[in-house]
Amino acid sequence: MLNLFIYLLTLFVQLMLGVFLFDHICKRKKSFVLTLLCYYTAFSGIHLLSVAEKDINTAIITGAKILLSYAVLRVFFDAGRLKALLCLVEFTVLQALVELPSLMLVNKLLNYNVMKDYTPTSNSVYISAGRVFLLNQFLLMVLLAVVIHTRKQIKSFRELADYLMIAAFDMIHGALLMVYYHTNSDSITELDNLIQLILQTLVFTLLIIQYFNIRRTRKLMTDAQELKMLRAETDNNYSYYRLADEKFDQITKLRQDLREQISSVKPLFGTQDGRLEAERIMDEIGERLNSIKVVNYCGNKTINAVLTFKLNEKRVEDIDTQILLEDCGGLTVSDYDICSLVSNLFDNAVESCLRAQTSEHPFIEMRSSRQNDYFVIRVTNTCCDETAGSSFKGIGHGYGLKIIEDICRRHSGEFIFERKDNVVTSIACLREVAE
């Protein structure tokens, strides 16, 4: 009976490490605990059936376990047929690689030739001791495989340190086990093996829990930092909206006042020379006023304010811009959301044009229209080959893109990105609410 408990505990740890490995290769669909419990319950059930019904062919039992593992990968993980098969092969190979070294370690520590009576189903106390050491070495192999599979996602030493922490505790625990078994080599019993295996199971379980807690905490901290940055970007957009709105009103009022002054000044000059001079001065003022870009392509004051502000920036001077806006009047979308949307779309397009290293002159084309119940803004602009996705990383180190997506989502729309050759098209769709 003790040997059965030892096998079931060993199985639990092996499957826990297997789920841990699969979790880093495939995307898990269910929770770690639920996946492990379903896997372990079915696997141990097959083993208990083989113990109770000794007449069942061993090949059938082995085949059932393999099919179960394959089914777990297909059902609980996002793994296709080939990927599931490769994961299963890798899991089996890793176990096989540590089996012989663990038995050789027992030979050394207990001064007993385990190999002479070893079979995969042996009930010897020495074989049980070998299974304890097998788990220690198996954990190290799984960690190595995980690091290899996730090496491209590891962005800092801190993330690598999570695996090193588990490996360090595993090696310390393994060293203590070696001391214990070497000291008590003449009196090891199955109860000793069971006690050590229980402690080992607790240690490994706590390490896995701690690992996921650290990852979850780090993700929460990252999300909190991103939220802080998004709030800062949102506050900046709101300040910009107020400033652009004020500037637009000021420029519009200035143009109107000066035109009125020009109209009233001309009749005051009675002499021919004075009249000619006055007209020259007034024409010069008119030219200066016309040099101020006031976008009046649509009936929406906010969009006009944003584009007036943007088109007067120095960085836009060498970019060909075409603004062809239709159906902008009477939008049910808030002025602030429209300001944020247009501002970030335009900034992303400008950043993309500034990065582009093409022989053609950079350009930005912005169009809008109403399509069914949606207000659609389409921005087409130059981009560069090697940084296709970077054209969206405008002000705020990519947070502008998140703001655009959030605005579209809140208005039951979507944000679409299309790229062909050196041209990017960004399409923001907002659902109009009937008043």
Image (spheres, rainbow, N blue to C red):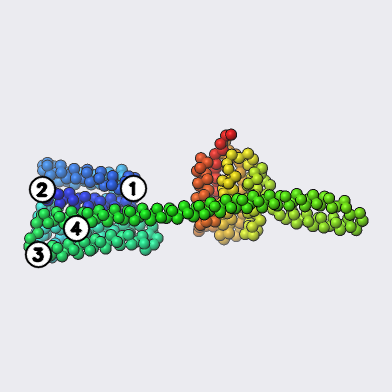
Q: Which mark is residue 1?
A: 2
User: Which of the 4 image quarters holds residue 194?
Assistant: bottom left
In the picture of the structure, the residue carrying the numbered disc 1 is 28
Numbered mark located on residue 36 in the image: none
74 left or right of 241?
left
- Label 3 crowd (10 A; few <14 / some 14-19 / many >=20): few
**Earlier residue among tags 4 and 2:** 2
Badge 2: how crowded within 10 Å, few (<14), some, or many (20+)?
A: few
Q: Which dot, 1 or 2, sits closer to the camera?
A: 2
Report x, y in % for residue 391.
53, 55
Left or right of 79 in this view: 2? left
Q: Residue at x 61, y 46 (%)?
A: 367
Name the quadrant containing residue 327.
top right
Q: Amino acid at mark 3?
A: Asn
Q: CA distance from mark 3 to mark 4?
A: 17 Å
Mark 1 surroundings within 10 Å by alpha-carbon count, few (fewer than 14), some (14 through 19), many (20 or more): some
Q: Which residue is mark 3?
A: 111
Name the residue carrying label 4: 134
Indicate the position of residue 291 as horizontal and vertical percent values.
Answer: 72, 55
Distance from Cα at disc 2 to Cα at disc 3: 26 Å
Tell which circle, 3 or 1, labels the residue nearer the N-terminal end.
Answer: 1
